[in-house]
Structures are given as C-alpha cells and as structure tokens.
Amino acid sequence: MPSPKAKNSSNRSGGGSPGLSGSTNGNGRYEFMSLNRTPPATLFQRQGSDQTAAARLRASESPTRRRGSGSSTSSNTGMPEEDCMRLNPSFIGIALSSLLAIDLWLSKRLGVCACEDSSWGSIRPLMKLIEISGHGIPWLVGTAYCLYKADSAAGQEIMFNLFMALILDLILVGIVKVVVRRRRPSHNHMDMFATFSVDRYSFPSGHATRSTMCARFLLAHLVLAAPLRVLVFLWSGLVGLSRVLLGRHNMTDVLFGFLMGYCQYNLVEMLWVSSLGMQGFLGLIQGSIMVRTVAVIGAGPSGLTSIKSCLEEGLEPTCFESSDDIGGLWKFKEVSEPNRASIYRSLTINISKEMMCFSDFPIPADYPNYMHHSRILQYFRLYAEHFKLLQHISFQTSVRSVRQRPDFSHSGQWEVVTENREGQEERHMFDSVIVCSGHYSYPHLPLKDFSGIESFEGKYFHSWDYKGPEDLYGKRVVVIGIGNSGGDIAVESSRVAKQVYLSTRRGAWVIRVLSDNGLPVDMKYNTRFVHILFQLLPVNWLSWFGEKKLNAMYDHTMYALKPKHRLFSTIPVINDELPNKILTGGVMVKPNVQQIRGSSVVFEDGSVVDKVDVIVFATGYNYDFPFLPSNVMHKSGHRVGLYKHVFPPTLEHPTMAVVGFIHALGAIMPQAEMQSRWVTRVFKGHKKLPSNQAMLKAVEYDTKDMDKNYIVSKLVPLQVDFVSYMDDIAGEVGVRPSLAWLFFTDYPLFKRVLWGPVTAYQYRITGPGKWSGARQAIFTQFERMFQPFKTRQVEEKQGCSVVGRLLKLSLTAMVGGAAAYYFHLQPPSSLTYLLSKLTPQRA
C-alpha cells in the first residue's frame, strides 16, 4: 500500500503511486488508465523531476505496447470515454499490463536494502553475501576446482555435469535477457559483484535460475539428510529474495527465474554425461589420459578383488593363475601342489560371513555364518560371475619372472615372463603389477631344531600336507604348534587316533567363535565402539579384562594352555572344541619338544611319550616372492618392508604393489579389497605416494611399532589391528566413514556404524566407489546373520523386551529416588550453600 504521504501527494496532484499508471476518482479510489496510451508528459512531472526515472519507465514498456499506444491515441482523439474503452486491447493484455504495473510498484516497495539509507539498509551486507553465494563465478570456479580434485569416477561425473549445467544456465539466461531486454529497476545500484554486459537486463534473474537448478542438483545427487535438504531449500529461496530486497530485480524476474531453473534441471538430466563419456571428453581435451595395463599375479580372493578394482578405475587387468580354477588357498585339492597353498578337507573359516565378505557383494543370506571352504569357493564364483572377472584370467599360466624394463626410469613398465600349460614361455609388457600370491605356499619345516629327528621311526609331515585324519586311525600323534591349524588338526585327529599330544612352545589364549546368546564373536566385539575403547584405555587393563572373561569359561592355567604373553599381544587361537578335547582326554597339552629318540619324543619338562607313530609340524610358513628381483623387496626386521604393507618404498615409480600380504584378527578378503582399491587409484594417478625417503621412514616406524605391541618373529612378521589398518587405508582411498558427519546427517546409520560390527559395507557409504546399497546392507546385516538359523519355526516369547525395559526403568527410578531421599536427609554443604543463594530472601 502507498504511504500516507504518497496518498496526499496523489490527491493534490491527481497522480498515483510512482509504480502505477492511473489516477484517482473523487472517492480517492485508484482507477487504472487505459494502458494502451502513452502517458502524457505531465504524468512524469507529477512523478517527480527525475528524468532518469521517466526514461526508465518509457524503456520498461515493450515496443509493441508503444506502437499500439500511438495508434490508439491518434484514432481516439475527441471520442467519448466508453468508445475509447472499446478500442483498448483485449482483456488479457489489460490484465498482463496491470500485473506488470503491480510488479513494478511491489518490487520498489520491497527494495528495502537497495541502498545504505534504505529502511533496511543495515542488512545490506548480509544480502550481498547471499547474493555472492548464488553468483555464477564462485559456482563455476568452485565446481571446476572440485572436478580437478575429484579422485573418483563418480565424483568426477557429478562435478562435470554440474559444471556443464552452470554453463547451460549462463547461456539460456543470457539468451532470454537479450531477447526480452527488460531494464533493471530504477532504484537499483549497479554495484554487483563481477557483472557482465548482459547483466544490464533484468528478466529473468540468473541468481534465481541458478539457485533453483543447483538446489535440485544437490538434492538429487549429494544431499540425503532431511536437515540439509531444508537448508538447501532455504538457501535457494533467500537468494531469490535477496534479488528483490537489493533492488536488483523485480518480483516477476525472480519468480520466472525459479520456474526456469526448475525446468533447466530436467534438461540437465536429459543431457547427463556418463562417466565413460566424461572421460572420453576430458581425454580429448588433455590428450594424455591413457588406459594402463596391469598384471595381476594370482586369482585368489586378493587377485579377484584386484581385478575388480582395476576395472572400476578403467584399467585393463590380466590375471595369471597357475592352477585351473579361482580361489587360491580356498581351492581344495586332494594332493598338495608345490609352491601352492593347501588346505585340509574339513577346513571351516573362523570369521563370520558378514565380516569376511566383499564390501559391495554380500554373501547370500542362507549361507551359514561360519562357512566350509566349499561354500567360500562358491561365493567367490558368484562374485567373479557377477562382476565379469573370469574373462580377465589366464588359467594354468605360471609367472616365471617380473623384471623392470630397460627404460623403467622413464616408463615405469615391467616385463612379465609366463609359462603356459604347454610349457611355452611368453613375454608381456605391463604398465604396472599387482602381486597377489599370498604367504601360505612355502611350508616352514624346521627339522634342524629337533634333535634326533633323523632317527624317528614313524612318519612326519607338515600341516601343509594334511588332508584328513584317515591315515591316523589308532595311532599316537604328536602335533607341534598350537596355531589355528595345529589346534584344528589335533581336535580332528583325536576323534580317530589312540592319543594326540599337542606341543606348544609358549602356549596360547583360546577363544570361541560363539559369543553371548550364540552370536558370532566378531559380530559382537569387532565394533568401532570397542576400537575406541582400545584407543582410550590401557592395553594391559583391557588384556586383564579379556583374560578374565576367557578364564571364566575355562581356566587356561588348569588346562595347561596359559601362554607367556598377554591376550592382545598376538592373534589368539580360535577353536571351540579344543577345551572339550582336553577335558575328555582326547588331547594332552605338552611343552616344547626337546629331543626325538627313535619312536620316543622327549619334552622340555622331562616327560617322554613312547611309541609315537606320526609327528605333524604345524610350524607355519615362510614367505617368498621368487619371481621378483631381489632389489625390489626391502627388508625391515623380520618382515618385507612395504609402505603400509602394500608398496615397495625403493622403486623409482610406484607401479608395483603387493595385495593380501597382511595378518590381522580379521578376514583377508576385506583387507585385500581395501588395499586393491588404494593401489588402483595410485596406478591411475588419483593418489600420490610420499617420497621414497618418507616411505622408508614410515616402514621403519611400523616395524618398531609392531615389535613394541605384538609378538613378531620370522614366521609371523606381520600383525596389525584390523579396524585401525582398514581405516588407515580407507583414509588413503577417501572412503573412511565420518562418525561426526553421520551423527548430524544420518543418525540411524551413525548408531549402526558406531555400535555395530565393522563390516566392509561401511567403506562403501561415501567417497570413490560409493555403493548405493551399502546403507541397506548395514541395516540388514543381522538379518542375514539370523537367516541360517530359521530352519524350524519356534514360538517366540512376546513382551520379554518390554518387561526388560520396564525392569531397567524401575531400577533406575528406584536408584534415583534413593539418591534424592539421601540428599534430602543429608544434603552436602556445597548443595546447601547453592540452594541458599538461589532461594529468594524474605524481607
């Protein structure tokens, strides 16, 4: 509404509001003039002496309206008013012209921040800040920078399409502005940030189109949480509002801008450029992006996930597998093959299925939680078929040598010599190499450490040759070594053997695969919350607490199992049956072997076992890479000195990596997958490694840290904390989940990531290789865990959880009431003093 002052002025002069072309009748009511006439010069005089304002008002009229006005005026001279109305334009034209007049008037009334002396001029800096947030230049520069820094194909795809959408917005808005040529409001101060010539025009508002289009883009591709969605909507609306408050645009400019921006996003979706198309486009521009060839040695779980990671990064992998099938260690064969890993017939993994599966391919729900090796191999087949990996594998092809090419300092390439099934050698050239040969291929048989072994009258062999207990019926067996293999062989052979003796040098902590309520122990305790406790609390206290829990099930001292080391100094033995076999006498635990005399075995405590038929050496494995040159692998203490257990630190170019050569209380599958994702990003050039000197220092630091925190030896040179190592490599890849971010953006997921098991799905929530099903996989992981138990319908008790919650609430209320009553009877002096200060004093 016009101000009182404007009304009085209008009544005196016969004029209207500055934004309206009209007059008042005797009742003081506004009557719009015939808008097909050119306003007389006296009207501009009544509006003021500012000729610039008059010129802007004339310019705001379209040429069509000016031509129509002139002809109408000349033809209606001296005619009655009702005849003039009959010659006016159509009703639609009158309505549109009236709306335009209202728009001009309303826009000026809302321009309260148009200058410093306006009614709301104090918030003008804030409005200008909002204006800049929707400006095209910051958006273009920021998007271009994010595109340059994006280290994933998905991220590059989103940033590239956003950049092209911003360019499209500038073009379309510029075209409409030039066609319409509507001038900016007369009260606008041309002090905008980085304006162009096209910005002399007002219709439509480029800020409004851009903010609406970008808001839809962000909501569709980047923002998930409801609070952030609200903020995006508010920002878009504030940008449009700021245009009117600052006097930059009229209301219709902004409203049409909102509509145009909304429609522009639909056009962006229609013209969306895929990741492959974007790479091709960037390749044409840069002329330097080349697809790298990668040699993958071994088709076990590490090799399979390495092939997949290569394909995800656009690399060309060729995998060489010496056997006729995938699976590596998990491919059972009745006869062990030289230089290949070997397992026994009954082997079952001691990691639950949800903790061992790959991050974007959950194990089928009906598979058992602890799987037999045949089920594991079946899962690998499903994985390879789903991601089409088999076509990249050359079976029955052994790698004989991997050597740097003569121009390695320039090209970083490798020459790989292979031998096929016919015994023919072939030479290949690769840009990079991933070694996935594992470390269970070379059994460690320390016969020189056992005096008199040459006189042994029975049979001895390494656990690598063990396939089953068939040859041990009725025999006396000594198993040397209490690792997982030694414990399994001792338990299984005790079912058929006359007596089994398990010899251990330093003892072991033995844990079960089952936890409270029959849950898998790793699903119960391998959580981020427990990991945080390990970072905050003393390790000795945690070891004491864990040892107390284990001894509550069975006293390790009484069972002759108690080791010389603390619980978390090395990876414990996982075996549910060993304590029972000790309890029933099927297995007798003995100290280290001192001497062998004929068929007798003498132990360090002086005890002797006669008539021994078989000795099984479960003494671990040596590690070796015979096909690599000696100068490639750097030694650090007992271990191969690899940067973060992956990259040789002495190479001039980081074009070789070792995947799966790691040891932790967790499955190798997710660790190898994380390593391969990092490796392929380094090969692709998305990630840079530190200098050789910095990597060597990091290797030595890791070696000292392992020596300090774990029991390491020549046979067990590697041990890392599963969660810490996974998070470390995930940080290199850019996929480590942020608990703080999840807390504010997705609280239900935050709870499951913090309190639930650290499954590999957590590393597909965000970043490069983001998987849309990761969130759902985390929410349903316990459902898949329970699925194998649902083989018989059992009536579940209803209301137990409600009763439990009521009981907890009652106990809490009782404790709170008791505490309140106690403080009422004996209030502390400090509380009494505080209450005296807070209580108002009476006069």
Image (tube, rainbow, N blue to C red):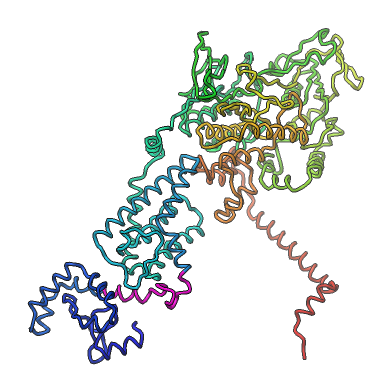
Q: Residue at x 70, y 24 (%)?
A: 635
Left or right, 433 with respect to 502, comes to left
Q: Percent position (x, y) of residue 358? A: 56, 35
In this view of the protein, can residue 377 be seen by the observer? no
Q: Residue at x 82, y 76 (%)?
A: 832
In the rendered image, which quarter contains the N terminus?
Answer: bottom left
Frontmost residue, 490 versus 99: 99
Range covered by the magenta-colored residues: 99-124
Q: Percent position (x, y) of residue 373? A: 61, 26
Q: Within the image, what quadrant is residue 784 found in?
A: top right
Q: Main secondary structure of the magenta part?
A: helix
Left or right, 748 with respect to 229, comes to right
Q: Is residue 164 above or below residue 298?
A: below
Frontmost residue, 807 versus 630: 630
Q: Within the image, what quadrant is residue 569 found in?
A: top right
In this view of the protein, can residue 641 be seen by the observer? yes
Q: Is residue 569 above or below residue 756?
A: above
Q: Percent position (x, y) of residue 811? A: 75, 61
Q: Percent position (x, y) of residue 768? A: 51, 41
Does the magenta segment cover residue 82?
no
Does the magenta segment cover residue 109?
yes
Taking the view exactly as shown, the residue that stands out farthest to the right is 606
In the rendered image, which quarter contains the C terminus?
Answer: bottom right
Q: Within the image, what quadrant is residue 97 found in?
A: bottom left
Left or right, 322 with respect to 78, comes to right
Frontmost residue, 609 versus 106: 106
Count the numbered circles shown: 0
Q: Residue at x 79, y 39 (%)?
A: 550
Left or right, 698 with respect to 508, comes to left
